[in-house]
Image: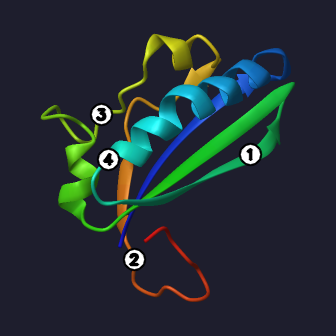
Amino acid sequence: MIARTWSAITSQEKEAGYLKTVRSLVLPHFDEAQGFKGSLFLKQSHDDGWKYVVITFWESLDAAYALSNGQDPKVAYIPDEISDTLNEFDKTVEYYESVIEHGVQFQQ
């Protein structure tokens, strides 16, 4: 199992737009990707807004890399519809290999 991480900061005013765009654009894109196992969108209070950490789970590194469509898999692809709802965001993503999985269920 591979975990792919990325983070961003949004304001209280932009948060609803961010979540709406995630649900309408990002999640369907993930769902169509071969090897996608699930995702977590975590948030934490940050100044006058929220910091989001997004963790997606993949069956293999090849499956996670395929999301980049042949581009550098460590560079985050952020469509304008998402970047317009953010104050800051990571330009890169990180990949981690799962060592222990306990009590976590993923999509089949």
The relative height of residue 6 versus residue 104 in the rendered view (above or below) is above
The local secondary structure at tag 1 comes to strand
Which of the two residues, 23 or 58, is positioned nearer the viewer here? 23
Which of the image's four quarters has the N terminus?
A: bottom left
Identify the residue under disc 3: 75
Q: State how far apart marks 4 and 3 are (Cα).
A: 18 Å
**Is tag 2's residue or tag 4's residue first in the polypeptide sequence?**
4
> Do labels 4 and 3 touch, CB within 8 Å?
no
The relative height of residue 53 versus residue 100 in the rendered view (above or below) is above
**Is tag 4's residue or tag 1's residue first in the polypeptide sequence?**
4
Residue 45: x %, y % from top left:
84, 40
- Tell me which colouring the rendered structure shows: rainbow
Residue 84: x %, y % from top left:
58, 10
Q: How crowded is mark 2: few (under 14 residues within 10 Å), some or many (20 or more)?
A: few
Which of the image's four quarters has the C terminus?
A: bottom left
Residue 63: x %, y % from top left:
23, 56
Left or right position of 10 against 58: right
Identify the residue under disc 4: 33
Q: How crowded is mark 4: few (under 14 residues within 10 Å), some or many (20 or more)?
A: some
Residue 98 shows which numbered tag? Answer: 2
Residue 43 shows which numbered tag? Answer: 1
Question: Amino acid type of disc 3?
Answer: Val
Q: State how far apart marks 1 and 3 are (Cα).
A: 22 Å
